[in-house]
Each structure stands twice: as structure tokens, then as C-alpha cells.
Image: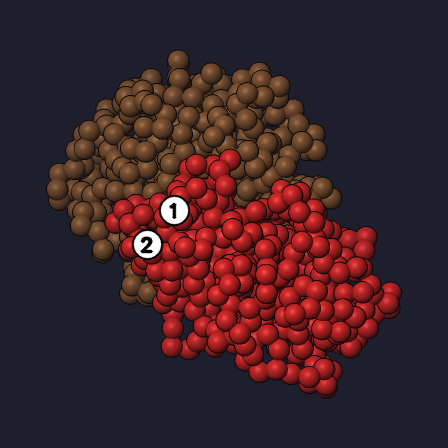
Chain colours: A red, B brown
């Protein structure tokens, strides 16, 4: 297998983007990434698109062909396909693109992630989101994503893995960073009180424990490491990409205070990258709900089990702390256009390792990590990037 | 890159399967393929699922995780993901699986394709199928898949590429073969008259020019060629897998009497396999509509442009003819559960090259080909298999 490098990144702004269509967003992110890699487009020989539910959000499936067409790639017959794994769609599209370059089947690959969520009713959105849970055994029984995560939070509080306040502090951390990110959906710092006193969504989780509904797209360009300098002054190496599954339904797990798929994917990723958790300086984790962020920090080994919540509360996940977590603002403040999220995480870590993260820059970062989750821990992809 | 082999195949019956759920079908096909490869399941380290629209057909996205879970793979955290490219979803899932094994990232991979289409209304089905066309510029203007293919047929007749009767003969050929396939949805031979005199769907295409709405699943197991004999007495080599794109909307093409993406993918595939079109003895082509089948035969180089229709009419695409085409019954008679189709094509060609195709067996076949299409020629994947 060949080593693979990132040579270009780009994102749209994330938010409620009423005046942009799905295709507008996809193209904007893709062109930004190609410009960043000094490509005209004619060098690209493969495309992978992460997207969860365009069929229901915009009544359009087959968006690999759509994006290839609108990016001007159809005239050269450039292969394109869509990858879906609910919230992990973006991270898995990235992994497929890494595989395509590593195998030698492709040379210059664009991987995009996009979702246009705000063009349908709230009711439709909830139904679509719930289609990533086990429809037959969870959703039809009335379980929603928020209620499943609320159960996880309750159990974690009961087992003294984290206090309610520590769980809430994950949102405070993400918002503090989002305030520094011009592309984030929410660019305003909040206090612990804001989280604790906002409306309950599923007890104990409030509105501020939950990531928003968002529109947005992100893209990165990959090529073999040995030719990366031809396109970029500051390429970033893909040190590892690993993926793992768990049961689709939460009730089938022995322990809901840990995501076994995160631990499994992380173990493989650290081994492939030949590093340990302590070598990670900056991480983007999947805080779709605050409690998911806390679990991620523990399951990735970035903080000890039972101590991650306190660490976040104490500022150890802030820029300048032990590990800078969700410097982009995370899903909570940057926004969570589902298919785009995993790719946007890669964009942020790439900027950090290049030293171009501006006001959010983490000093001397060599290794960065992304953790992207589909369902309630049912599918997890962990990627490790390395500054070179 | 490592060479890759097929060591197991399996399908469900195709048809209106009212008493089986999506997960029932996926698991049945997967277990048949694993049994065929003499696997218990514990050897599998990756899964790829081709599916177009489970989110709308059964209100369930995230079916990679679903199938991994119900196949008992979640307890070992086996990675699984869904690939979507409309009608080409199955063929592309196969291609990703080949890439995974070729790259060395996986060893034993199950690739499945499945669709459960008959649990929603005809109106919903049409809307879902149309989401594979360009929603913004075709479907919202009233164009349907059938009407787009009718325009292609009209133009082909006008340009004397094929007569109406020759186009219809594609369905006669598929039904003759489907009659020999116990898993086919329609197991009855038909005459040219049946096609020509049945109800018009979109002039000139009648009901018998169009593939049915189907439920079904298919699966294959892949491993590196050098260990294939450990699992199977008759492994089949993957000689090539190639993919190409074209514009999503038909009106943007210069010539609608050819699918450039088929030609491009075929060119690459023949070159990778180091063979020519004349070396192909048996082919499964994407006859979603009869006219698509005729175009496929020409664009793949199996018959000369302008002569494919006549060749089919003359029996040259039958078992015993120049190239045996759609020995399974094709999309028309075997059925077309969208995501399953591309994988079912691989299953049929594998059986032919192993010599286990029973009453449908083609004599002395060394090379077989599959052509799987998404949209109206917007995304095409061509795979070439080789008997060893």
C-alpha cells in the first residue's frame, strides 16, 4: 500500500443556508479544496461523496453522479460514488478515498461530504434522523436519537462516570472554540448556566446539549504522499484510517457507558500509526450530543474513564489544554450537516497540522485525530493525521 | 495491488416477497454466500452493501450497520458501509470490496446488494426511482425513467440503430433465459408479439420493455487470489473492475444513442484484464429497459453499433450464440431489486465460469462481464471475471 497525503481542504459556511442548494454547497467546498491543492480539476481521477439522506432531504439520490457532473468531471467520465453510514458518512467516504489512493486504483481523489437539511419540516427531519437508529426495534417504539443519548447520559451520571455539569461543559468547550471559527454555525461562547437552564429535549439533555440541524459541505483532496509536494507546500500525511461496527440498537449492548466501536477503531488506528493516545495534540470528536463527546474522549483513551468530564470542565480540552478538542466548534457549534461532518473534521485537523488554524491554532501539534460516529455508536471511523 | 478472487456467491429468490423483510433478505443472501465459501463468518473482516433507497423504501438508513449487526458481525466490530449509486449501487459496492482486498486493507470481504421495493405504493416507488434522474432539471419537469428511455428508443429507431422489433427482442431473449433460472421473478418465455402488443408505458416502450419492481438480495465473498483455493474448489478471478461517469441529465448529452460511460468503463476494464471484447463469452448487462440492453451490447463492443438489435433478434445473444447475454434472465426477467442487481450479475457470471449454471450453462466460457448502470447512463461499472 502507498502512503497517502492531504493536499487541499475546503468548506462552506455551516448553518441554515436558505439561499444555497445542495449542489451549490457541494461544488463550493470541492472547488475550494481543489484551489487549495493548486488543481484545475483535470488531474482528478476519482470522487467519493459522504451523504446520509439526500433522497429524503432533497428528493435526489445518485448524488455521486450529480456532484461529478456539476463539478465538470462527467466530460472526463471521472468515477464518483456516494457512501452512507448515517453520521459517519463523511469519515467513511474519506476512508474509501484513502483506500482508493493507497491501493493504486486512483491518484488524485476528491472526497466531499454534504447535507442540505433545512429544506424540509422539523417533523420530516426527525423522521430522517431516526432512520439511523434501528427502525424496527427503536424508532417505531418511540425512541429518538435524543432520548437514546439521554439514557446514556442518565446511566453515566448514575455510575459516576460524569456529573451533569461535566457533561454540559462539553458544549461550553465547543462553543468557546466555535466563537473563533468564521465558518461555524454558532460563533458565540456560552456558560454552563446556558446549557443547564435551556429547554429540556430529553431529560437530562437540554437544547444546548444537542448539535443543531445544519446545511453545509466540506471537501479534501488526496494523493500519494510521494508526489504531494508537487501540489502543496504543506501536505499532511494520513497516518491511519480505521473503522468498526457495533449493534445498531442500543438495548443490545452490555454496557451503554462506552462505545466499543470507538475503542476498537482507535486501537487499530493507533497501531497503524504506530503511536499512542498520548501523542495526539488535537482531536475532533463526534459531539452530536454532549454525552457522546465525553464518551469519545474516554473511549479514544485521550482521558481516563471517569475523568474526561472533569478534564473538560477544568479546561483540559480547550486550546492550550492537554488535548485541544473540537477546535472547529465541534458538531455542537460548528454545526452538523450530517454527511459533511466527518470531512469537516479532517479539514480542521489538516489546518491545525499545517499551522493555518488562525485564532484556533494549537501550538506544536504533530498528530491529530478525528472520530466520526454513525447511529448511537453503531459505526465509528477514526482517522489519524500527521504533520510532515 | 493484490489479485482478488470470488470464493462464494448467494442470492434470494427475486420477486414480490411479501413475507420477507429487508433484513431477512440481506441475511439470507449473505449466509448463502458464506456457506458457499465454507466460512463460519469469523473470518470476515469487512462488509460493503449496495442499496439505493432503503431510507425511503423501508424508512431505514444506516443499513451497513444493520446488516453487520444482524449477520452477527457487530460483536467483532467488523466494518460495514453502504454504497449508493442508484441502479449501479451493487456493482459499485463490489468494486469497493475489490479495492479493499486489492489494497491489503481487508482479507475476507462480503459484498451484499439488497432492495425491498414492494412495501410502498406505486406512486412512492415512482418518486423514489425518479430521484436517480436529475431531480431539478428532469423529474420536476415530468420526465420519468421510462420516458427518458423512450426518447432514447425513439432516437435509435430514427437513426436506424435498431428497429422497434429488434429492441423488443431484448426482452424475448431475457425471458427465454429467465425461464431456466429458478430464482428469477418471471420464469416464462415470451414472444415478440407479447412485447409489442402489451400496454404502452412510454411510447414506444411497453410493459414488457421495462424491468419489474422487485424485492431481493445477492451476496458474494472475496479474498486474495493466492489463498482462494483454501476456501473454494472453483474460485473465480476478478480480472478487472472499472467505473465511469456521465452527465446526470440526459439532455446534456451530445448523443443519446450511446452511453459514453459504458464505453469508457469497458475500455478501462478490457485494458486492465488485457483482453478484447471478442474474448467475452457471457455477459450480464443492465436491461432496465430493453433499449438500455441494446445500447449496452454496442457500447461494450460485444456487437457492432447498428447491428446489436439484429444480432439479438437472430439469437446471437442467446445461450449458444456469439455471446450469451443475461443468462440469469437479466433485469427484465430475473427482476431488478435495485441495489441487488449489480451483485446478482456477479453471482450469475461466477456460476457460469465455475460451470455450475445448470440449464443455463454456457460452454467453455473463460471470460464473463457485468455492466451495471446508475441513472440513464450517468454512472456505469464494468467488471470482468475470469475462470481459473
* First along the sequence among labels 2 and 1: 2
User: Residue B231 at x, y = what percent?
Assistant: 62, 21
* Circle 1 Cα neighbour tier, 10 Å, few/some/many (<14 / 14–19 / ≥20): many
The disc numbered 1 marks a residue on which chain?
A
Residue that sits furthest to the left in the current view? B159
Quarter of the image where one finds residue B362: top left
User: Residue A234 at x, y = what percent?
Assistant: 45, 55
Q: Are discs 2 and 1 both within one chain?
A: yes
Foreground: B156 or A302?
Answer: A302
Residue at the image position 63 percent from the left and 73 percent from the top:
A174
Residue at the image position 54 percent from the left and 77 percent from the top:
A180
Question: Which mark identifies residue A108?
Answer: 1
Residue at the image position 21 percent from the left and 51 percent from the top:
B253
Report if residue B146 is visible in the image. Answer: no
How far is disc 2 from disc 1 in space, using C-alphas? 10 Å
From the viewer's perspective, is residue B157 above or below residue A288?
above
Residue at the image position 81 percent from the left and 52 percent from the top:
A254
Q: Are marks 2 and 1 in contact (CB under 8 Å)?
A: yes
Foreground: A384 or A48?
Answer: A384
Residue that sits furthest to the front in the current view? A364
| Residue identified by numbered label 2 | A39
User: Residue B147 at x, y = what percent?
Assistant: 28, 53
The disc numbered 2 marks a residue on which chain?
A
Amino acid at each position: 500500500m502507498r502512503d497517502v497525503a492531504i493536499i487541499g481542504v475546503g468548506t462552506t459556511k455551516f448553518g441554515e443556508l436558505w439561499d444555497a442548494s445542495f449542489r451549490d454547497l457541494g461544488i463550493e467546498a470541492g472547488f475550494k479544496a481543489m484551489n487549495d491543492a493548486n488543481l484545475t480539476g483535470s488531474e482528478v481521477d476519482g470522487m467519493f461523496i459522504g451523504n446520509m439522506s439526500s433522497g429524503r432531504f432533497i428528493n435526489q439520490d445518485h448524488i455521486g453522479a450529480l456532484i461529478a457532473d456539476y463539478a465538470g468531471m462527467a466530460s472526463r467520465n471521472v468515477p464518483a460514488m456516494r457512501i452512507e453510514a448515517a453520521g459517519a458518512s463523511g469519515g467513511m467516504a474519506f476512508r474509501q478515498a484513502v483506500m482508493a489512493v493507497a491501493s493504486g486504483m486512483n491518484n488524485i481523489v476528491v472526497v466531499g461530504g454534504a447535507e442540505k437539511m433545512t429544506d424540509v419540516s422539523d417533523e420530516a427531519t426527525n423522521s430522517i434522523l431516526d432512520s439511523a437508529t434501528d427502525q424496527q426495534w427503536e424508532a417505531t417504539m418511540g425512541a429518538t436519537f435524543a432520548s437514546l443519548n439521554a439514557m446514556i447520559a442518565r446511566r453515566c451520571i448514575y455510575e459516576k462516570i460524569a456529573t451533569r455539569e461535566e457533561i454540559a461543559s462539553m458544549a461550553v468547550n465547543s462553543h468557546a472554540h466555535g466563537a473563533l471559527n468564521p465558518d461555524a454555525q454558532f460563533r458565540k461562547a456560552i456558560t454552563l448556566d446556558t446549557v443547564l437552564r435551556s429547554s429540556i429535549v430529553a431529560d437530562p439533555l437540554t437544547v444546548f446539549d444537542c448539535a443543531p440541524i445544519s446545511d453545509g459541505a466540506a471537501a479534501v483532496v488526496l494523493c500519494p504522499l510521494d508526489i504531494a509536494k508537487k501540489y502543496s507546500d504543506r501536505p499532511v500525511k494520513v497516518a491511519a484510517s480505521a473503522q468498526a461496527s457495533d449493534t445498531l440498537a442500543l438495548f443490545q449492548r452490555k454496557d451503554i457507558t462506552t462505545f466499543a466501536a470507538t475503542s476498537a477503531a482507535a486501537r487499530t488506528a493507533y497501531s497503524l500509526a504506530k503511536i499512542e493516545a498520548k501523542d495526539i495534540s488535537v482531536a475532533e470528536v463526534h459531539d452530536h450530543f454532549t454525552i457522546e463527546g465525553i464518551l469519545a474522549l474516554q473511549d479514544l483513551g485521550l482521558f481516563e474513564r471517569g475523568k474526561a468530564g472533569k478534564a473538560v470542565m477544568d479546561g483540559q480540552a480547550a486550546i492550550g489544554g492537554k488535548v485541544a478538542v473540537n477546535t472547529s466548534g465541534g458538531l455542537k457549534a460548528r454545526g452538523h450537516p450530517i454527511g459533511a461532518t466527518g470531512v469537516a473534521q479532517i479539514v480542521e485537523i489538516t489546518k491545525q497540522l499545517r499551522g493555518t488554524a488562525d485564532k484556533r491554532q494549537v501550538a506544536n501539534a504533530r498528530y491529530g485525530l478525528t472520530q466520526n460516529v454513525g447511529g448511537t455508536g453503531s459505526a465509528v471511523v477514526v482517522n489519524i493525521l500527521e504533520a510532515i
